[in-house]
Image (cartoon, grey):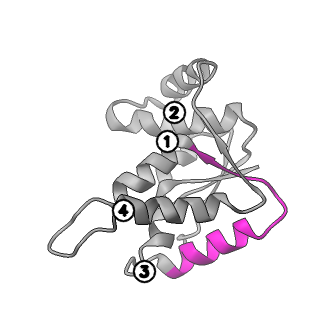
Amino acid sequence: MISVDSNVLVSAFKTNDENHAVAKETMDKLLNQKEQVAFTDIVMFEFIAQVTLKLGSAPAPSPAQALAQLENWLSAENVSVIRNSPKNFATFNRLCAETGRTGQKIYDAQIAAICIDNGVTEFVTGDKGFEKFTELRIRNPFAA
């Protein structure tokens, strides 16, 4: 099973993003393959928060637009949602201890714990910090 980080989703959604073409192609390939793709609940919330944040004078997409895109991705036959649960806390605790995660970086450990405990083997992200979670194979679609 493969999971995707919010930075890939954001880049695939925002047509003016410098990584848009690569992220959109990555998502298209993932959603049209046979292998299962899992979205974590946290990543979905991060996606909505990031794309609806108003930056500068340009209008931000509405929550309804962000949700419509998520619903579109979630409608693919090979997509499921994996959620945070009490069992993830032990894995989260171990990952924080092993990687020294503190502050805002703990959310990466939380996402990794959900993925690990739900059978995800590959995580697609542009965030190099995930490479410390050695139980997940990391694929960076933006790396040259």
Q: Which residue is mark 2?
A: 110
Tell me which numbered mark, 3 or 2, is placed earlier along the sequence.
3
Residue 107 or 36: which is nearer the viewer? 36
Q: Quadrant of residue 33?
A: bottom right
When the figure is inspected, residue 75 is found, relative to residue 132, above or below; the finding is below
Q: Amino acid at mark 2?
A: Gln
| Magenta-colored span | 21-40
Tag 3–tag 2 contact (CB < 8 Å) = no
Q: In this rendering, would 71 be left or right of 51? A: right
Q: Which residue is mark 3?
A: 15
Tag 1–tag 2 contact (CB < 8 Å) = yes
Q: Amino acid at mark 1?
A: Ile
When the figure is inspected, residue 60 is found, relative to residue 37, above or below; the finding is below
Label 1 crowd (10 A; few <14 / some 14-19 / many >=20): some
Residue at x 37% of width, y 81% of height? 16
Label 4 crowd (10 A; few <14 / some 14-19 / many >=20): many
Q: Which residue is mark 1?
A: 42
Q: x, y percentage for residue 101? A: 42, 31
- Tell me if I can see residue 30 in this picture: yes
Mark 2 secondary-structure assignment: helix
Q: Amino acid at mark 4?
A: Val
- Kindly report the distance in space between the C-alpha atoms of the residues bearing marks 4 and 3: 11 Å
Residue at x 28% of width, y 68% of height? 60
- Tell me if I can see residue 144 in this picture: no
Q: x, y percentage for residue 144? A: 55, 76
Mark 1 secondary-structure assignment: helix
Q: Residue furthest front?
A: 64
When the figure is inspected, residue 43 is found, relative to residue 56, above or below; the finding is above
Q: Amino acid at mark 3?
A: Thr
Tell me which numbered mark, 4 or 2, is placed earlier along the sequence.
4
Q: Which residue is mark 4?
A: 51
Mark 3 secondary-structure assignment: loop
